[in-house]
């Protein structure tokens, strides 16, 4: 697994490069103390990143994207989102089953948290992957502040939907926008679940989900919802975009699992995007829970992962 953490305060953002992002487990545990760190401590081992887990380049991460609101081609989000997506001002609504519902200006939403840099693997359900140096803060911070009630079992997320800014209207089949995702509350509170505000120490580019997205590194990339405007605590499992669109192919859990194939393709291996290679990628084995099993496998104890795919 990858644990590469650097606290924001340690280094000016201009200095953050792939080389300067280092493994420091002590800092990670410090940063996550009291918010489920015991779980992490109990299961986790610090491993050096294997050689094939070098971070992808800025260029790769920002030019090969999925953000269907801006088109379905991998180059469409970089072409369409930066000039169209208005990220300032940005409001995030926190509502549902919690004691402290509120509408936050983005600055106030982020301010109480300590910003960290974390490099995570990103494995898309389409069987390509990258390694991404995100900047952000633990989702559990927001959950703690909201104080979900005892009835809350899930957290639902919504992307901005504004047809004026988002040119998707020309393609079929139609998605029932806004893009929606969800996590079980314990998954959302896991210290690896990150609300992302930046990339390589810089502001998050529009095509990667500015100004606020999720990174849930043990799940297929479509769970990592972009450009979040609403976070809602619910009792029932919330409807999510792809599981609603094609339930036979995409489930609510969507944990990375090489033993459970997609009905139309194998999930045993993945294409790691690598522009230094002749075909722009290299083939590697997919790891159970994307290599984060030590940290998160206990969340699924006793569950049939073929049924709960
Ligand atoms: N969020 C929204 N709102 N719309 C999308 O189309 N695509 C998902 C996810 N989040 C998507 C989204 C998919 S399928 C993946 S693989 C990741 O974003 C891709 O993130 P990236 O473009 O930063 O690599």
Image (cartoon, rainbow, N blue to C red):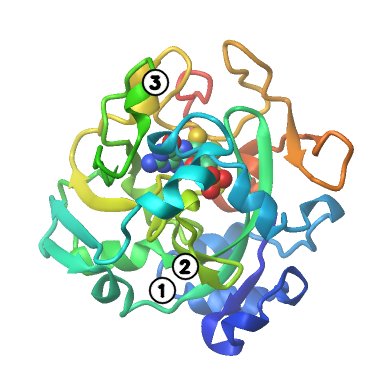
Q: Label 2's element?
A: strand
Q: Are marks 3 and 2 in contact (CB under 8 Å)?
A: no
Side of 94 where 128 appears, left or right: right
Pinpoint residue 250: horizontal percent, then vertical percent: 45, 22
Q: Label 1's element?
A: loop
Residue at coordinates 34% horizontally, 68% vertically from top-left?
A: 141
Residue at coordinates 20% horizontally, 34% vertically from top-left?
A: 236
Disc 3: which residue: 171
Label whose residue precedes the other's in the sequence (3 or 2): 2
Give how far apart the Cα atoms at labels 1 and 3 are.
Answer: 46 Å
Q: Is residue 212 above or below residue 303?
A: below
Mark 3 vs ligand 1: CB below 8 Å: no
- Mark 2 is surrounded, within 10 Å at the Cα level, by few (under 14), some (14 to 19) or many (20 or more) other residues, namely many
Point out the frontmost of discs 1 and 2: 2
Location of residue 244 by image quarter? top left
Whether residue 294 is visible: no
Q: Label 3's element?
A: loop
Disc 2: which residue: 136
Count of marks, rendered view: 3
Mark 1 vs ligand 1: CB below 8 Å: no
Label whose residue precedes the other's in the sequence (1 or 2): 1
Q: Is residue 177 above or below residue 35?
A: above
Residue at coordinates 27% horizontally, 70% vertically from top-left?
A: 109
Disc 1: which residue: 34
Q: Nearer the viewer, residue 194 or 38?
A: 194
Whether residue 73 is visible: yes
């Amino acid at each position: 697994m990858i644990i590469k953490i650097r606290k924001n305060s340690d280094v000016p953002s201009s200095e953050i490069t792939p080389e300067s992002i280092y493994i420091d487990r002590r800092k990670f545990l410090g940063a996550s103390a009291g918010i489920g760190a015991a779980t992490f401590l109990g299961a986790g081992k610090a491993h050096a990143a294997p050689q094939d887990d070098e971070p992808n380049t800025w260029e790769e991460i920002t030019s090969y994207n999925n953000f269907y609101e801006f088109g379905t081609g991998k180059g469409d989000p970089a072409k369409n989102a930066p000039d169209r997506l208005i990220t300032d001002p940005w409001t995030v609504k926190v509502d549902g089953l919690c004691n402290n519902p509120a509408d936050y200006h983005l600055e106030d939403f982020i301010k109480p948290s300590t910003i960290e840099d974390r490099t995570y693997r990103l494995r898309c359900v389409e069987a390509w992957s990258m390694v991404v140096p995100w900047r952000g803060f633990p989702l559990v911070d927001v959950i703690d502040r909201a104080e979900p009630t005892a009835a809350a079992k899930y957290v639902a997320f919504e992307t901005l939907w504004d047809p004026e800014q988002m040119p998707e209207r020309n393609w079929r089949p139609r998605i029932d926008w806004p893009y929606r995702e969800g996590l079980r509350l314990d998954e959302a509170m896991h210290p690896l679940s990150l609300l992302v505000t930046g990339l390589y120490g810089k502001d998050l580019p529009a095509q990667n989900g500015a100004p606020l997205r999720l990174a849930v590194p043990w799940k297929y990339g479509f769970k990592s919802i972009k450009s979040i405007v609403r976070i809602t605590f619910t009792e029932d499992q919330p409807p999510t975009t792809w599981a609603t669109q094609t339930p036979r192919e995409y489930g609510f859990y969507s944990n990375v699992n090489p033993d459970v194939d997609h009905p139309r393709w194998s999930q045993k291996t993945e294409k790691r995007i690598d522009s230094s290679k002749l075909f722009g990628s290299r083939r590697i084995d997919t790891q159970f829970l994307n290599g984060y099993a030590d940290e998160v496998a206990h969340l699924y104890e006793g569950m049939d992962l073929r049924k709960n795919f």
